[in-house]
Image (cartoon, coloured by chain):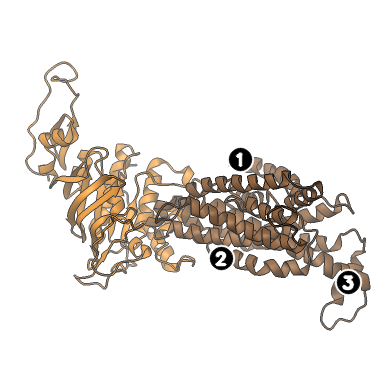
Chain colours: A brown, B orange
Amino acid sequence: MLGPLPSQPPPRLRPTRLAPVQVLAGVAFLLVSATASILVGPAGFSPATVLQALASRLPFVHLHSGLAATVVWQLRMPRMVLGCLVGAMLAVAGASYQGVFSNPLADPYLLGIASGAGLGATLALVDGPLLGHLPGAAVQPMAFGGGLLAVAATFALGRRRGSQPSAASLVLAGVAVAAFFTAVQTFLLQQSSSVDLTAVYHWILGGLATAGWAQVVQVLPYVAIAMAVLVALRRVIDVLAVGDEEATSLGVHAGRARLVVVAAATLGTAAAVSVSGLIGFVGIIVPHTIRLLAGPSYRRILPLSVLFGAGFLVLADLLARAVLSPEELPLGVVTAFLGAPFFLVVLRQARQGA
Amino acid sequence: MLRLEDVSVRFGGTTAVAGISLQVEPGGWLGLVGPNGAGKSTLLRAIAGLVPYEGFIAVATHQAAALPGPGGRAAARTGGGGRTGASAAPVPRRRPWARTRRTGPVPSRRAWARTVAYVPQRPVLPPSMTVTDYVLLGRSAHHSYLGAETARDRRVTSEVLGRLQLGRLAGRRLGELSGGEAQRAVLARALVQEAPVLLMDEPTASLDLGHAQQVLGLADELRHEVGLTVVCALHDLTLAGQYSDRLTVLSDGRAVLSGPPGQVLTQANVARHFRAAVEILAGASGPVVAPDRLGSATGPAGGPAVRLPAPSTRGP
């Protein structure tokens, strides 16, 4: 068998690509989730009423549906759209981080964005000695700014002189920054009133209860740009699977690629977190489920994360509204409650199949 | 042609490679040998542009580097062709002490990946990646940065897979390959880079003798077919002698000895630079370096050791 190898005929190559059936499955899942999300709500409209209300705002359609139109177009639609943006962003950011940090546990909050945003929101919500009383509208810009600041601090600390930081030093710096920001936040909370505490607690658990078109318009540019950049980098992230040094020898500057991914993911995640609070698990569970079902290539994982991340969060939000209606469950609780068992089932089956 | 002038690599206060100058002609095979920590891997990584260095590293691109089969491209894209078309390696992570003399245009990392291909000592093999996807990574510097692989990328990859007997394994996952198959996949990824220079760092370290010969034999055939310039670090002195045109012995980061294998691989040289007791036997394809048991003047059975005369030239 050994000895000189004779040439074989060149094989027909089947490189991994996104299959149309996978895209169709993602689109179908998103459409079902979105439709259900529009149809269900505490107002108890019949599906026909909702459809009529939907049609009433379309151009050249003259229908009168009054309250239903307002509820559907001003409450349910923006909430559904915002859920799509936030879910897609968290899933894509999580997937990208898992790729560029070669770390299956990486999530969008890896580099301290959650603690930064949390501190920003806390500063805005708590009547503290630092900033006094801030208007409610300050929460979103403060959370956004806090998230950006935390990641910038992580990058500055993880950097070695004159070079791009390695994945490991960035992750460690992220742990330190998160611990520091959380410490400051805890101190502020400990000093604050119980009313403020409740407000911060609600923000941390995450949710889309305050969603409106204003929030959609606010986050859309950041999320759209971030997702476009990350999905465009899917092949580059695949090259990074062989490690920084080998990727470099193949012509891909690993440090630079990681910098671009972190910048884009941070911008999009900070925007998403600023309107939705800290929703956990989406960034880990959605990409991993896709990875287990569709393989390890980011050519599939990243585009599918957009569709399934959006659909998953909209579905979770629907349950958050419907289970104890008219009360709402915190969205972060639902994503973990739904996602963790489902993920375990997929993991088990993938292991058995392997 | 690969040319190094006075190349040094320092990590902090320690010098890993000190002032190495060498030249390898197109189609030539330079073997790097030396004890552990001599700087072989570091020198290869400097040539691959992976560690900052001082000095000058250039590849003259007048020599054609094409893949087997009719589809091979005539020359690497860096440099304008002709005898003067030299490109210096990129120096990553500039440090204050990295005084680098560079002549001519400095190529980008992508251009360098089309000039020098590198087989690392311990390649990272993502277990669930398919052989096809893995080997196609070698084409990264050929297609556009964000774009998909082109028809040409697929053709070159397919030819190399066939040449390296990986055709039937193209759809397999890397985790399912044997050691020899995995090493062929790594070599395939380097070959699809279509670079005129191939660097190999201990490509046979994890292979049994038969598979080691297979991998080295493939690289050897290809360098004759397409005029590939090979620089290969090997621990096994016999194998190094059999495949190399010239051997350079590194010790403490310096090139202490250089020449044809028959001249370099003598009992005295191995004793001096490797602190090893060996017998040099005359093999059909070069000197055979056979280790002696340290501290024993007699053979394993208690009788006198068989001593053969050391060959003065390389065998046929």
Q: Is residue A171 above or below residue B88?
A: above
Give the letter of the chain under mark 3.
A
Q: Is residue A166 left or right of residue A188?
A: left
Q: Say which label, 3 or 1, has the lower sequence index.
A: 3
Give the letter of the chain under mark 1.
A
Q: How many marks?
A: 3
Mark 2 crowd level (few <14, some 14–19, many ≥20, 10 Å Cα): some
Tag 3 secondary structure: helix
Q: Do the numbered discs 3 and 1 sit on residues whose CB atoms are within 8 Å?
A: no
Q: Do the numbered discs 2 and 3 sit on residues whose CB atoms are within 8 Å?
A: no
Give me the disc on residue A69: 3
Q: Name the image quarter holding residue B198.
A: bottom left
Tag 1 secondary structure: helix
Tag 2 secondary structure: helix
Residue B54 horizontal/vertical position (percent): 25, 56
Give the CA distance from mark 2 to mark 3.
36 Å
Residue B65 in sight = yes
**Location of mark 2 (residue):** A229
Q: Is residue A93 left or right of residue B165?
A: right
Say what amino acid the circle numbered 3 marks: Ala
Q: Say which label, 2 or 3, has the lower sequence index.
A: 3
Mark 3 crowd level (few <14, some 14–19, many ≥20, 10 Å Cα): many
Give the CA distance from mark 3 to mark 1.
48 Å
**Location of mark 1 (residue):** A351
Q: Name the image quarter holding residue A120.
A: bottom right
